[in-house]
Amino acid sequence: MTIFRRAVIGLLWIGLTQATIAGESNKLLFGDTHLHTSYSFDAYLNKNQTADPDTAYRWARGLPVIHPFNRARVRIGTPLDFLVVSDHAELMGVIRAINQGSADQQDLGWWGNLKRWFAVTLLNRAIEGGEGAGVFNSILPKSPDNPGGDPVADTANVLPTGTFGDTLATETTAWHEIVEAAERHNKPGQFTSFIGWEWSSIPTGANLHRIVFTPDSGDKAKQFVPFGSDQSQYPEDLWQWLEDTRDRTGARFVAMPHNSNISKGYMYAETSLKGAPITAEYARRRMVWEPVSEITQIKGDSETHPVVSPDDEFADFETYRHYIQQDRQTYAPTPADYARSALRLGLALEQKTGVNPYQFGMIGSTDSHSGLSSAEEDNFWGKFARDSTPQTKRSSDKIGGGEVTGWSMSASGLAAVWAGDNTREEIFAAFQRKEVYATTGTRMQVQVFGGWDFDQSTLESVDFAALGYRQGVPMGGNLSAVLDTALERAPQMMIRALKDPNDANLDRIQMIKGWVDKAGAQHERVYNVAWSGDRELDANGKIAAVTNTVDLNDASYTNNVGAEQLSGLWTDPDFDPQQRAFYYVRVLQIPTPRHSLYDAVSLQTEPPAEGPPTIQERAYTSPIWYTPRD
């Protein structure tokens, strides 16, 4: 791209990332809500012993930092607007403190103290000898004894506890240090640092983790210590703790599921984790605390899967086939593991109970454990610190049994937020109203509005966003709020997408629709809305693949295909006013090199088999829902 064209795109970006809502400035912000530092036990065991919360915030703000493993000076390509440091609540800061000799040690009696001394000695030797990952693997849960049952109650779900005695004092110290780091780096209007943590329930290897964060200050955060899965592995108990803590301290929270793709069919099931039917009360409670889900990250993409969406030609994207457990099971995807099928199921459950438990918005984040939020393919520093170089990515078995390498991971993702300002309050409000979207690392700008009164002039207007808010609802909204009196008319979706000025051109815009019929059967369909070049729809509504310009010899590509901007005014051709439905937008870039190809070129080897050499980065907006009138 020429300097002139890059400047033009930059000006378009600046102009289009500002939207007017009742006279207020609505900004597009990019951040990461899922980042681990040396205070997380698994990060520390995998060679992140120095990248603390201060390092994480400095990296996110664009400052150069020292990599915790290879000790190189590293720097993010484009700074973030916000970050949540979300270290594991379980043993928060404990392994770090033990290794550094700063842990608060409880007197366990002579026998208990001796066992702890041996455990600490072996732990330190393992870390120093580079065997920390083996220690981590040894405490992972095993396969379920009774697949399909309550995984928490399963007898296989027995993890060693109490080795280090009561760790509350050490965890409290670590939590206060994390809180204080967030307070130091929070710069309203410039950079937002949220206070948060991860609740890491993983019974029998079923990933049920939630990221929790609060927009409130450190004074409130220091009135509690984060709730961990060592207190309970049931999400209902997490929600109860959030409710009780809110009532006691006034602190507000959002909890977000992540990595549903490896939840073994539990994250978005037809029943609760305990096997009870989902009721209206359960659905309301879940939506109070979990309005948003993370659907793309380092451990793969959770939008959908070819088994779940066999007619979707783009369903097999960054598919991760590894459960987190000591004895690796063969990966078996189910509809309850993926966001799109969860959104469909939510409509069916709403039809039965009156409340949708899966009416969630969608974001991406990294889940990096290196302290570095790196989602850029050519600047990707791995999940763990020890995965930071092409050579060390060759080592396998990073997080359990089986062949999992650094190339199995995805350089993903980012949380995009349309917010009134770059502050804790405004970003939190955007999460609550679900005006957020996911990207796999690219910073393309996407907006979508649903309504009945749009026309071509609205789509092309410089007041696109203002008219969208005035005449319809944005992503995360419900069309029932602007129901047309003439129900025979189908809803419209007005969409704009602009490329990341530092990344690849756009291939296409797609609309993903899901609906449930009167009999309760669930359906989905993918529609091509707008695309680059002179390609045409075939009889099945599909278009030919965009040209792949990637040169596998030098990991380069060209932007002589694709479009800098795409837009479309789409009307649902299959609308039935009596059927519940959701609509979300998927935007695809042209093919670009995957991080594994950059490594292969540098190593002068063939691209590794763990992932394709090229990918089509993408964005997924939060849905817009349609609910029939009673």
Image (tube, rainbow, N blue to C red):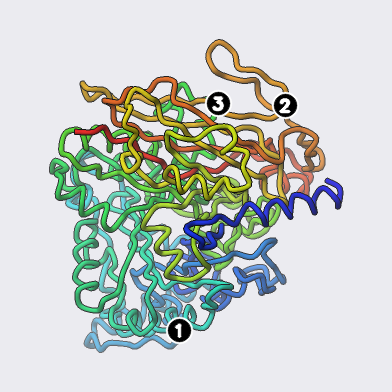
SS assignment at label 2: loop
Q: Where is residue 333? Give x, y as percent.
A: 38, 34
Q: Tell me if I can see residue 383 in this picture.
A: yes
Which residue, given by chain and number where applicable, does mark 1 sit on? 180
Which residue, given by chain and number where applicable, does mark 2 sit on? 533
Compared to residue 101, the image places residue 343 above or below, namely above
SS assignment at label 1: helix
Observer-nearest of 19 and 161: 19
Mark 2 / mark 3, whichever is N-terminal:
3
Q: How many marks?
A: 3
Mark 2: few/some/many CA within 10 Å (<14, 14-19, 20+): few
Q: Amino acid at mark 3?
A: Asn
Identify the residue at horizontal 48%, vertical 84% (top origin): 100
Q: Where is residue 496? Give x, y as percent.
A: 59, 41
Which residue, given by chain and number where applicable, does mark 3 sit on? 528
Distance in Å between CA atoms under marks 2 and 3? 14 Å
Distance in Å between CA atoms under marks 3 and 1? 48 Å
- Left or right: residue 391 versus residue 143 is right
Image quarter (top left, top right, bottom left or bottom right) of the N terminus: top right
